[in-house]
Image: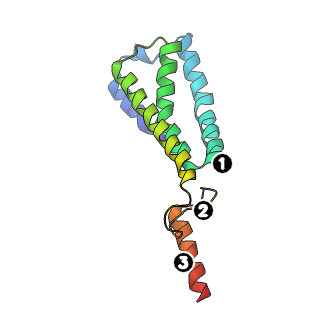
Amino acid sequence: MCKTIIAVPICFIAETKSSAWTLRPDIALVTIVLSGFFGPSFSSLLHTWGLHLKGPLYISIFKPFSIVVAAAFGVIFLGDTLCLGSVVGAIILLLGFYAVIWGKAHDKDNENCGSDNLRASSDGKTPLLQNYRDREVESDTRK
């Protein structure tokens, strides 16, 4: 709702022709309606489910990756033109995505490395500093 309140005045200033605001019953109207109903709810549901399964790291990766998916669907279904910048950006995002997944896979191999106090919990969902603070509290109560 806040996005709409912010965007409406800017849209009216940017597009002054009233003919641009009329909706015709074609693929554009179907796209607007479907994206309005299913876009935010489906996206939130998918991200919440992923957060529950894997944790916040993967969700922060998939947010920018959705831009790549949207660009690909725009080219395939809506006939948008594919620009070189979109392809280069998609490649960079995919390489970053792969690097994080590769790093996470090697993180499990190196679990025993490093200081015992600075390691995160075994489930990978406890924040690093929270785990460190919990261990400090335990050591203080033992004294």
Q: Which residue is mark 2?
A: 121
What count of labels does the image hold? 3
Would residue 33 be visible to someone looking at this image?
yes
Report the side of 141 relative to 22 (left or right).
right
Q: Disc 3 to disc 2, how far (Cα)?
A: 14 Å
Q: Tell me the number on the disc at residue 52.
A: 1
The residue at which mark 3 appears reads as 136
Point out residue 37 in the picture as x, y percentages from the top left corner.
Answer: 62, 29
State the image quarter where residue 25 is shown: top right
Disc 2 is placed on an element classified as loop
The quadrant of the image that shows the C terminus is bottom right
**3 or 1: mark nearer the eye:** 3
Q: Amino acid at mark 3?
A: Glu
- State the residue in front, 6 or 110: 110
- Distance CA(mark 2)–CA(mark 1): 16 Å
Tag 3 and tag 2, C-beta contact below 8 Å: no
| Residue beneath the point at 48% across and 37% down | 97
- The crowd level at tag 2 (other Cα within 10 Å; few <14, some 14-19, many 20+) is few
Residue drawn 46% across the image and 32% down it: 94
